Image (spheres, rainbow, N blue to C red):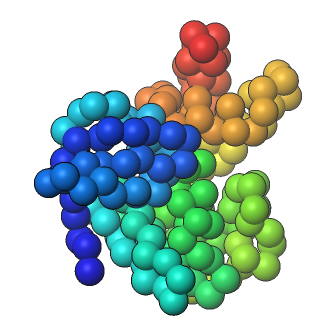
Amino acid sequence: MIGSIKGKTILKTDKFIIVEANGVGYKVSVSLDSISKIKNEADIFIWIHTIVREDALDLYGFLDREELEFFEMLISVSGIGPKGALGILSVASIETLRQAIGTNDISYLTKISGIGRKTAEKIVIELRDKFKDEKTGGALKEEMDALEALKSLGYSQNEARDALKNVTAVDTNAKIKEALKILGGK
């Protein structure tokens, strides 16, 4: 099994990267958040989760071990495959996802594209014990309020989530202002 790759990024798309290591190019699927942090033609060290199937050998890459471990927890939930888990990791920070799961906030998870109510319930039921000590949903509620405010201003859910991932503010109004600055700069 491949556990990590150290090499040079030779191609970057919106779904995967190709990392060349010792003359071999490895196609590695990564989250949108990771893609935004990776530079073309840059040296990279990436943690790998390898999935071997009868007809494929797929590599999923992560910039840090915490993201890899969270991905592995997500794919342990029945009905969540590796592409679905990457999609979940692409829309919110790990901290936010932990809070949503730990506080049984199914409504937050259903706002993720491709996650229906039954799947969100499965995620919460199967993982909530691992995150039950997470801070209660105050920060989560503020993020949801900010997300809804940005959507009411005409931004898509994906645009609003991407902007909120880069916000450092704590209260709702400050989150909205900071996200608007980010969205206005695009």
Q: Residue at x 68, y 32 (%)?
A: 160
Question: In percent of the image, x 55 and y 41: which residue is there?
Answer: 14
Q: Total label count? A: 0
Image-quadrant location for residue 109:
bottom right
Image position of 79 with respect to 9: above or below: below
* Lateral position of residue 165 relative to residue 17, left or right: right
| Quadrant for the N terminus in the image | bottom left
State the residue at coordinates (62%, 66%).
84
Which residue is most to the left?
22
Q: Where is residue 71 in the image (x, y as percent from the top left)?
A: 45, 68
Residue 85 placed where, x, y %? 56, 66
Residue at 85 percent across and 28 percent down: it is 152
The reply, left or right, for residue 128 in relation to residue 123 is: left
Give the percent coordinates (x, y) of residue 98. Answer: 49, 63
Q: In this view, does 145 lie to the left or right of 179?
A: right
Q: In which quarter of the image is residue 155?
A: top right
Q: In this view, does 177 lie above or below 155?
A: above
The answer to whether residue 136 is seen in the rendering is no
Residue 116 visible to the viewer: yes
Q: In this view, does 18 lie above or below 39?
A: below
Q: Would you identify the image quadrant in which residue 61 lies?
A: bottom left
Residue 135 in the image: above or below residue 165 = below
Q: Which of 81 and 10 is in front in this view?
A: 10
The front one of 6 and 103 is 6
In the image, residue 115 lies at what x, y percent? 74, 66
Q: In which quarter of the image is the C terminus?
A: top right
